[in-house]
C-alpha cells in the first residue's frame, strides 16, 4: 500500500508542470495533468475514428502516463525543434525513477506502456500519439493561435510536427484539422513561414 501512496503523491507533481497553451477562457496556462486527463477523454470520444480498431483501455492508460517524466524534466512545447534525443533520454530516466516507486511489477508495466507510446509502433500507440498531437492544435484553433503567436510558431512547423502522427493514428482527425489550420493561417494566427 505504501508504495502506491508514494507513487500517487509523486505523480501529483504533474499538476505543477506548466505547458505553453492556455485552457479555453482562462488566463493561466494548462498543466500536464490536465492535458493527460483531456487526452483520455478525447481518445475515448474518437475511438471510432482510429485508423484501425484499438483497445481503448490500453490507449487511455498510455495517455494517462505518457507525460509522467515531465515531473523531472518539465514540459517542452511539441513545436520546438531540436534536442529531442536528449529530451527523451532525460524523460526515460525520470519515468524509470518514478515508476520504480511501485512494487509487484506495476512499475514495469507502466514503463512498458510509456515505451510503447514513445515508439509509436502499435495501433494503440499510433492512435494515442495522434490524440496527443491534436490536442494543442485544437486548443490553439479555439483561442486564436495563442501559443503559436506567443512562441513564434509557423504554420509549416505545426503541420510538420503534427501531421504524420495524426494521419497515422486517426486520418479523419487530420482531415478535420488540416482545413482549420489553413483557415488559421489565413487569419494570421501563425508566425511567418518564411
Image (cartoon, grey):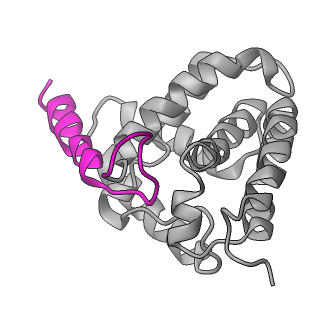
Region in magenta: 1-27
Q: Position of residue 97 (x, y in %)?
A: 32, 55
> Eyeballing the image, is 8 above or below 165?
above
> Eyeballing the image, is 89 above or below 22?
below
Q: Quadrant of residue 124?
A: top right
Q: Is residue 7 magenta?
A: yes
Q: Position of residue 150 (x, y in %)?
A: 50, 70
Q: Position of residue 129 (x, y in %)?
A: 67, 43
Q: Quadrant of residue 10?
A: top left
Q: Residue at x 52, y 27 (%)?
A: 40
Q: Quadrant of residue 123?
A: top right
Does residue 123 appear to the left or right of 39 in the view shown? right
Does residue 98 appear to the left or right of 89 in the view shown? left
Does residue 165 appear to the left or right of 91 in the view shown? right
Q: Is residue 138 magenta?
A: no
Quarter of the image that includes the C terminus: bottom right
Q: Residue at x 68, y 67 (%)?
A: 190
Q: Nearer the viewer, residue 79 or 155?
A: 155
Q: Position of residue 119 (x, y in %)?
A: 69, 51
> Eyeballing the image, is 90 above or below 180?
below
Amino acid at each position: 500500500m505504501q508504495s502506491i501512496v508514494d507513487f500517487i503523491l509523486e505523480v501529483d507533481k504533474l499538476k505543477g508542470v506548466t505547458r505553453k497553451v492556455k485552457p479555453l477562457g482562462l488566463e493561466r496556462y494548462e498543466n500536464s495533468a490536465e492535458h493527460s486527463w483531456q487526452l483520455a477523454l478525447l481518445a475515448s470520444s474518437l475511438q471510432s475514428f482510429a485508423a484501425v480498431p484499438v483497445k481503448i483501455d490500453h490507449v487511455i492508460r498510455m495517455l494517462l502516463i505518457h507525460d509522467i517524466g515531465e515531473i523531472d524534466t518539465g514540459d517542452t512545447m511539441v513545436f520546438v525543434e531540436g534536442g529531442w534525443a536528449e529530451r527523451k533520454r532525460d524523460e526515460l530516466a525520470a519515468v524509470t525513477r518514478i515508476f520504480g516507486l511501485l512494487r509487484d511489477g506495476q512499475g514495469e508495466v507502466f514503463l512498458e506502456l510509456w515505451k510503447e507510446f514513445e515508439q509509436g509502433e502499435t495501433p494503440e500507440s499510433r492512435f494515442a500519439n495522434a490524440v496527443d498531437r491534436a490536442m494543442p492544435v485544437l486548443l490553439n484553433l479555439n483561442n486564436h493561435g495563442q501559443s503559436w503567436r506567443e512562441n513564434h510558431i509557423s504554420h509549416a512547423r505545426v503541420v510538420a510536427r503534427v501531421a504524420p502522427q495524426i494521419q497515422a493514428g486517426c486520418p479523419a482527425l487530420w482531415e478535420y484539422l488540416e482545413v482549420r489550420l489553413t483557415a488559421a493561417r489565413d487569419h494570421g494566427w501563425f508566425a511567418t513561414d518564411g
